[in-house]
């Protein structure tokens, strides 16, 4: 298993640059050290001063930088240009949209060209091969499917709570099954309620911190995911 010791944000970005220099987001961060410093300040408002890099060459994640921030929190940094390119016409990016079957971010905000999405850490180590088929069936109910090559265990996690409720970890991994139809609003609302009921304390606590953070770093409704 890939393991790293906690380090400061700037050191974590430098580590990703050394292990995966072709990563598009780390290239942007390297060229804009002021954004890295600003991100570090934002994380310190959450009492996060050290992180563990989760992105390295073996992860094949060349568009984003994932950092484990402790307390069950993962922060995902993505160059906005790459984010726009990743979302094709089959499922257009909508910051306020809850995609059923996909783990929603606790919050989302921007620093320059970098989009920072904060996610809860959920169990991904106990995902079985059979769960991939189950997840595909669930997505189909919502008119969704995995993108080619993304139907794999690494893109799936298990939500806490009763039963074996699965969720796609990477929103970039899914697309519309039938482009002539979209996602039903009721499906989105039910999924949001399901996730929050299982992870409510985590979402609630961090949303309070975001409200404080927004006093000094305003977050527009477009960038904030309730």
Image (spheres, helix red, strand yellow):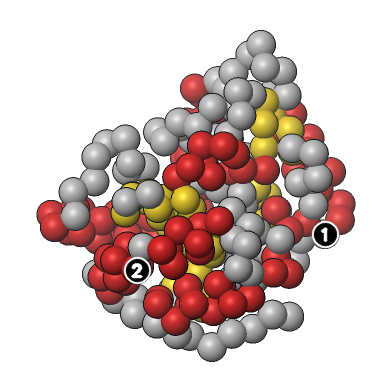
Residue 103 at what x, y percent from top left? 55, 48
Residue 194 at what x, y percent from top left? 52, 43
Residue 21: name its quadrant: bottom right
Residue 52 at what x, y percent from top left? 51, 78
CA–CA distance in space, label 1 to label 2: 40 Å
Picture residue at 60% right of the left edge, 39% below the top = 86
Image height of 182 relative to 188, above or below: above
| Secondary structure found at label 1 | loop
Query: Which disc, if any, is residue 128?
Result: 1
Picture residue at 82% right of the left edge, 59% below the top = 128
Quadrant for the C terminus in the image:
top left
Quadrant for the N terminus in the image:
bottom right
Mark 2 surroundings: few (<14), some (14-19) or many (≥20) residues within 10 A: few
Picture residue at 49% right of the left edge, 22% below the top = 185
Query: Which disc, if any, is residue 120?
Result: none
Residue 147: name its quadrant: top right
Residue 161 in view in this figure: no
Query: Which disc, if any, is residue 33?
Result: 2
Mark 1 surroundings: few (<14), some (14-19) or many (≥20) residues within 10 A: few
Picture residue at 59% right of the left edge, 61% below the top = 23
Please indicate whether residue 20 sits to the left or right of residue 49 in the image: right
| Secondary structure found at label 2 | helix
């Amino acid at each position: 298993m890939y393991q790293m010791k906690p380090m400061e944000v700037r050191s974590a970005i430098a580590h990703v640059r050394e292990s995966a220099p072709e990563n598009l987001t780390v290239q942007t961060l390297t060229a804009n050290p002021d954004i890295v410093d600003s991100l570090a300040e934002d994380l310190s408002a959450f009492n996060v001063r050290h992180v563990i890099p989760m992105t390295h060459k073996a992860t094949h994640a060349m568009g984003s930088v994932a950092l484990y921030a402790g307390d069950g929190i993962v922060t995902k940094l993505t160059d906005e240009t790459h984010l726009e390119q990743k979302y094709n016409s089959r499922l257009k990016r909508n910051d306020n949209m809850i995609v059923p079957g996909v783990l929603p971010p606790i919050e989302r905000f921007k620093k320059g060209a970098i989009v920072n999405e904060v996610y809860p850490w959920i169990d991904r180590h106990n995902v079985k091969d059979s769960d991939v088929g189950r997840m595909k069936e669930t997505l189909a109910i919502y008119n969704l499917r995995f993108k080619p090559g993304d139907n794999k265990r690494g893109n799936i996690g298990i939500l806490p709570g009763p039963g074996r409720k699965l969720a796609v970890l990477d929103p970039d991994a899914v697309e519309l099954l039938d482009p002539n139809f979209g996602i039903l609003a009721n499906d989105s609302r039910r999924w949001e309620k399901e996730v929050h009921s299982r992870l409510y304390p985590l979402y609630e606590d961090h949303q309070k911190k975001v409200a404080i953070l927004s006093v000094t770093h305003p977050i527009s409704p477009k960038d904030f995911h309730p």
